[in-house]
Image (cartoon, rainbow, N blue to C red):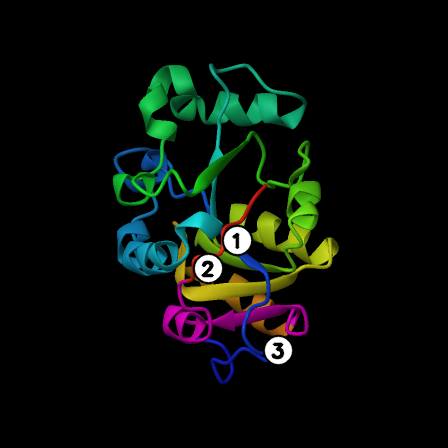
Amino acid sequence: MSKGDELRYGAPGNAVHICVDMQRMFAIGTDWTMPWLSRVLPNVVAITSAHPERTIFTRFIPAQSPGQGVGMWRRYYERWDSMTIDRLGPEMIGLVPDLARFVPPARTLDKHVYSPWTGSDFQVQLRDADVDTIVVTGGETEVCVLATVLGAVDWGFRVILITDALCSSADETHDSMMNIYMNRFGQQVECVTTETLLASWPGDDARFVS
């Protein structure tokens, strides 16, 4: 929980909820399984339920087969050959069922690297829709969530990180990363619980148009 568990700058403005990589390949029976994804899933569902039309699910798309990828990503998929699409099966890159049911009106954004900002016009889409605030949930706290948060900070978005809607496969590094979010990025990242967020950002009928 953050210091005081409060939104320092008041209720979210024109916000979108970015749910990071809550996919089947991270939920069940793979080398990248996050054991406590299921523990935070109800909170992610609660936020998505309140704002399905303002939710964007990112999906991490691995290489098709071992040996593919540019530069160090090639070595990465030699090490993690079990996590290529040919080995996993394409269905495993899909969202977990509890979240897939929200698409549409929620939408997906596929990426081949940790950051959704790299190699895409994501920032332009959000600015064109006058979005000024990013609410972040999902996993992993210290990998793809980190890349999502830092990109949003660099682009000047207000970032609200939901402490009880994040997951990782490693408790120690999750805890360390939360300390960094709350302290080193304390001026640019607000860390609050699901309850605190939804108290200030109840569901509405406004639609995010990309």
- Mark 1: secondary structure: loop
> Residue drawn at (41%, 42%), measured in percent from left and top?
105
What type is the residue that disc 1 sits on?
Glu
Q: Residue 185 colored magenta?
A: yes
The answer to whether marks 2 and 1 mark residues whose Cβ atoms lie closer than 8 Å is: yes
Observer-nearest of 131 and 111: 131
Mark identifier at residue 142 = 1
Q: Horizontal and vertical percent for residue 79?
A: 49, 26
> Residue drawn at (38%, 29%), measured in percent from left and top?
93
| Residue 143 visible to the viewer | no
> Residue drawn at (30%, 54%), measured in percent from left and top?
41
Query: Few, some or many C-alpha atoms within 10 Å of disc 2 (few <14, some 14-19, many ≥20)?
Result: some
On screen, residue 41 above or below 162: above
Tell me the mark number nearer the camera, choosing from 3 and 1. Answer: 3
> Residue drawn at (53%, 51%), measured in percent from left and top?
145
- Mark 2: secondary structure: helix
Q: Which residue is mark 2?
A: 174
Mark identifier at residue 9 = 3
Q: Which residues are magenta?
A: 184-203
